[in-house]
Amino acid sequence: MAHRVNIEDVAREAGVHRSTVSRALTGSGPVSAANRERVLQAARKLDYHPNTVAGALKSRRRNTWGLLSFWYFTPSSLDHYYAKVLGGLLDTAGKAEHRVLLQNVVGRFDQSESCRRFCHESQLGGLLILAPRTEEAALKDLRKQRVPTVLVAYRPRDRELSFIDLDNVHASRVLVEHLVHEGHRRIGFIGGELKLSANARDRHDGYLAAMDRCGLALDARVDLNRDFTPGFAVQAFDAMWALPRTARPTAIVCATDRMAAAVGDAARAAGLRIPEDLALCGIDDDPIAAPAEITTVRFPFYEVGAQAGEMLRTLSEGLRDGPLQVLLPPQIIVRRSTSGNAR
């Protein structure tokens, strides 16, 4: 089989590096007039024609950002949190003339071979990882790869990684302080999986810090964490309400509004009045929160996506060498679920 002339052959014939050949033939970078002429002569002599399709594809990859997202279930385009974060990111990517390649993972970052392939083999111009469920140690490998990477809605313990997140610690802290102001002293917490979710850990840490700051006793029986599902929230409420009356909480902070809404329904089914018998708070200001009159914390989800895109552009264009790290503040929204007479 005849040898097919390639860019290495042209580089040897011209006596230059292959990158010089690439720049000379594609106009993708500076080349001296003398080197350009040598490359063109070598290409004509060897009858070499660059693969413009492959070059275009490579250029397109450089202008493509990858978004790796993690959910318990496939996200709907109508999902409040997902849609707003994605909307902010796509708007920023569009202004930067970048495409976004999305891969959703139902599972864990540290246990998925497809995640590793996506991160290391896609030749992306940049990578965003949205709310990964993972053992934190697995994220250390991100520092070794050459693709600029931003963690979105995840605050890692590793301060060498770039991230943008909501200040979840402050979110649950202001809710506990609000309940204390309303007169509550027995405050429970229902949260997500502490081992695999940075959001779950931060929201729980904020609860613990506020309880300590307010001088309130912690009771493991009313501090229950497993996952973010409404089903678990109801199970946790049932366990709390099975306690002796004096041990039951008079208020509960739930890690999401959907969990708080599920607890509210279960409490009313048990004959309780909200907020007279039990005050409830959630986090996120999900569309379910306003009609359910749930006190919550509002986050700028669109800004999370938009700023994530700006951060990735800054890193991918070499405008900043070190990690970029941003926390966005929450805003408490007080509604009827906490406005009654606390005991």
Image (tube, rainbow, N blue to C red):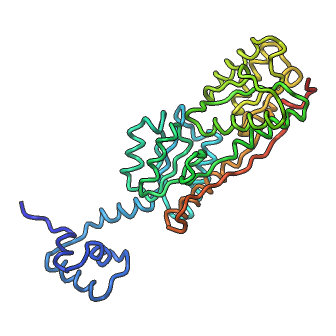
**Relative to 253, residue 332 above or below:** below
Residue 342 locus on image (x, y percent): 91, 26
Front-lying residue, 96 or 316: 316
**The quadrant where residue 154 appears:** top right
Left or right placement of residue 162 versus residue 25 in this view = right
Q: Looking at this rendering, what residue extends furthest in the left direction?
A: 1
Residue 156 locus on image (x, y percent): 57, 46
**The quadrant where residue 173 appears:** top right
Q: State the quadrant of the N terminus.
A: bottom left
Residue 7 locus on image (x, y percent): 22, 70
Left or right placement of residue 274 versus residue 75 in this view = right
Q: Looking at this rendering, what residue extends furthest in the bottom direction?
A: 34
Q: State the quadrant of the C terminus.
A: top right
Rendered residue at 43%/35% (across/down):
111
Left or right placement of residue 151 versus residue 259 in this view = left
Rendered residue at 19%/80% (across/down):
14
Residue 50 locus on image (x, y percent): 25, 70
Rendered residue at 59%/55% (across/down):
308
**Relative to 214, residue 151 above or below:** below
- Counting every numbered tag in the picture gives 0
